[in-house]
Image: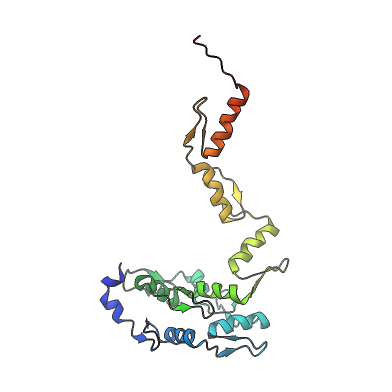
């Protein structure tokens, strides 16, 4: 749905930046946005002195020093650096938060908030270093790691560190030999999703380049040219049998 077609939704953007006029649904999002104009970093790590614009960034950063995981799941006992709502969804499968625009349901209120931004095209999470904006807080957090050089996720087998948790998961397959991604056409398994995607193109790629001499088809014109050269090499002076 086009944002111009939703006047009622625009009215909900009730928090306005006095500097640039941009509007936001949530007051805290406006507060974070205003920091991008001032370059203010009010949240300082009391261990190393590094400063951050956002409290959440400081919280993630401090966990690198302390290894603390203060949030405990009362169902399975696992501990986490940040809130439990998403993890507990694994146990309950409940999605109590509903979008008033399209009716889609979500397990987390924050996920609903991010989803609603797709209807308004709002990007409230702005990097105070390069100015790039994001709809989702998770995308913004990962982006910030590229500037900070922080790699808070470590492989517990070899100690190698990564900026994203999913990269650790994929890396660990190199130790375990696990190949969880399977081609649904031939059954071959791979350790990386990108590899199986590339592999499947072998099956699905159309062979549109056909040899005029023997009829063999190829998916790339270069391969056809190489093949046709074998005909010329094998028989450079074809006889005219009609004579």
Please state the horizontal and vertical placement of residue 59, each as a whole percent of the image: 58, 83
**Foreground pick, 183 / 87:** 183
Residue drawn 51% across and 69% down?
90
Q: Is residue 182 visible?
A: no
Q: Is residue 164 left or right of residue 2?
A: right
Q: Is residue 90 visible?
A: yes
Q: Is residue 54 above or below residue 136?
A: below
- Position of residue 17 measured from the top left corner of the image (x, y, whole percent): 39, 86
- The residue sitting at 55% across, 88% down in the picture is 41
Name the residue: 37% across, 72% down.
121
Q: Which image quarter is the N terminus in?
A: bottom left
Quadrant hosting residue 19 = bottom left
Q: Residue furthest top?
A: 243
For this view, does 176 lie left or right of residue 224? right
Q: In the figure, 179 relative to 114: above or below?
A: above
Colour scheme in use: rainbow
Q: Position of residue 65 (x, y in %)?
A: 67, 82
Image spot of residue 94 (x, y percent): 43, 71
Answer with left or right where residue 201 lies relative to residue 153. left
Which residue is at a point 35% across and 71% down the rendered structure image? Answer: 119
How many numbered discs, if any?
0
Front position in the image: 236 or 25: 236
Residue 22 vs residue 233, the one in the foreground? 233
Q: Is 240 drawn above or below residue 192 in the view shown?
A: above
């Amino acid at each position: 749905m086009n944002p111009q077609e939703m006047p009622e939704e625009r009215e909900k953007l009730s928090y306005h930046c006095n500097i640039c006029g941009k509007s936001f649904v949530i007051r805290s999002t406006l507060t974070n946005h205003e920091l991008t104009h001032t370059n203010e970093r009010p949240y300082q790590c009391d261990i190393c002195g590094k400063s951050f614009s956002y409290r959440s960034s400081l919280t993630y950063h401090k966990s690198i020093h302390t290894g603390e995981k203060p949030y405990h799941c009362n169902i399975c006992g696992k501990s986490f650096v940040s809130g439990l709502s998403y993890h507990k969804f694994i146990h309950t499968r409940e999605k109590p938060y509903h979008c008033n625009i399209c009716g889609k349901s979500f397990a987390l209120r924050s996920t609903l908030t991010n989803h609603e931004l797709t209807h308004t095209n709002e990007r409230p999470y702005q990097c105070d270093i390069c100015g790039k904006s994001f709809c989702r807080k998770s995308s913004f957090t990962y982006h910030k790691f590229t500037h900070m050089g922080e790699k808070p996720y470590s492989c517990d087998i070899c100690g190698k560190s990564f900026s994203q948790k999913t990269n650790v998961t994929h890396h660990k397959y190199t130790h375990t030999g696990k190949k969880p991604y399977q081609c649904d056409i031939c059954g071959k398994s791979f350790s990386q999703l990108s590899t199986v995607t590339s592999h499947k193109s072998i099956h699905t790629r159309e062979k549109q380049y056909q040899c005029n001499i023997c009829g063999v088809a190829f998916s790339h014109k270069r391969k056809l040219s190489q093949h046709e050269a074998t005909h010329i090499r094998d028989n450079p002076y074809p006889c005219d049998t009609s004579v």
